[in-house]
Amino acid sequence: MRSTALRTSLLPALLLALASCAPLATRTASAPAGSSALPTGFPARCAPDEVQVMLLGTYAFPGNAFDAVKESPDDMLSLRRQEELQELAARLADWAPQQVAVDWPFALNDTTAARYRRYAAGASTSSRNEGAQVGFRVARRLGHADVLGFGQPWTARSDSADALFRRRPDLRQRVDSTIRARQREADSLAGWRRDATVTEQLRALNSDGALHGGHSAALFGGFLEALDGDNGGGADVISDWYARNARMAQNLTRLVQPGTRRVLALVHADHVPALRSILDESPRYCPVSPLPFLR
């Protein structure tokens, strides 16, 4: 039971702990220099026959009690944030995506479709989730018939990382120390987040320094070095993370309709680097940064 608990709670939580607040911390140092440039890793241009997928990296609008790093975002149903979300939706709609996909479970798409159709018919939503507050809003503005989810739950395929942490308590202590440091960073940015608009926060999350810094710290700066003798359990965590994102890209493939050339995909920012790489390697897709529409 201890092994299962570690695999299902610590490892995903650590990924979120390292990736979720690190982008905002990076913002303070790197955003002014690179705010007008596209992040590295995105193709300079897309071929005419490729499906462009705008990967909009987001944070958890309602917050998440299960994350290792605790944050308290503003209430997205407040008048101020609702006005900001309207402005954000108008920016994204200017790109004219033909479909909108959200990071909700692919397996529950009947429910997602029904929720969106009620919203598109004029119902309001009490959900603070970014999928509803941004994805639904953009789709309704453009008159879309559906919004569907391409999310994939976390699954870990190996016990090697669990065994590694049991045998090497110093690695576990390093994890705990990193989470504490990220919590301090998140706490120090709380004031900036209260003052910044939703668009400004998303601009920071999708900057080059944010995507690279958060991703590198979460995976290659942490788990790549997590090994002990023949146990390379950290590499298994990296493999599991990429497997999850590959399944998300596959779910997206199931959703894209014939003739679609532009898809807006909302996903937590820690997924963007892996999804960007996977989609760029596919001859069918061309990942696109949202930064030009967040300036």
Image (cartoon, grey):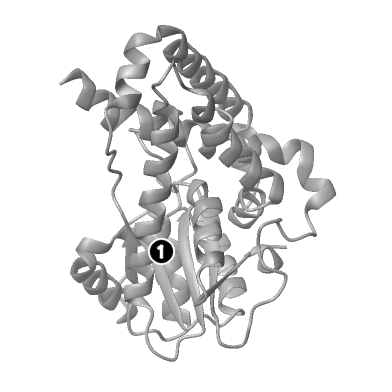
Residue at position x 58%, y 66% in the image: 88
Residue at position x 28%, y 49% in the image: 153
In the image shown, does 206 or 143 lie closer to the viewer? 206
Q: Residue 131's spot in the image, x, y percent?
A: 39, 61
Residue at position x 71%, y 56% in the image: 40
Q: In the orientation shown, which residue stands out farthest toward the right? A: 33
Q: In the orientation shown, which residue stands out farthest toward the bottom? A: 259
Q: Is residue 106 above or below residue 232?
A: below
**In the displayed structure image, the side of residue 295 where residue 9 appears, left or right:** left
In the image shown, does 118 or 248 lie closer to the viewer? 248
Q: Is residue 276 above or below residue 44?
A: above
Q: Quadrant of the N terminus?
A: top left
Q: Does any portion of residue 86 appear in the rendered image?
A: yes
Q: Residue 33's spot in the image, x, y percent?
A: 84, 48
Q: Is residue 172 above or below residue 62?
A: above
In the image shown, does 56 or 86 lie closer to the viewer? 56
Label 1, secondary structure: give it: helix
In the image shown, does 286 or 85 lie closer to the viewer? 286
Residue at position x 52%, y 75% in the image: 283
Using the rendered view, name the quadrant where residue 116 is placed: bottom left
**Residue carrying label 1:** 249
Q: Does any portion of residue 67 appear in the rendered image?
A: no
Q: Residue 126's spot in the image, x, y percent?
A: 31, 58
Using the rendered view, name the quadrant where residue 127 is placed: bottom left
Residue kind at label 1, given as amino acid type: Ala
**In the displayed structure image, the side of residue 118 where residue 183 appears, left or right:** right
Mark 1 Cα-neighbour bin, 10 Å: few <14, some 14–19, many ≥20: many
**In the displayed structure image, the side of residue 46 where residue 57 appears, left or right:** left
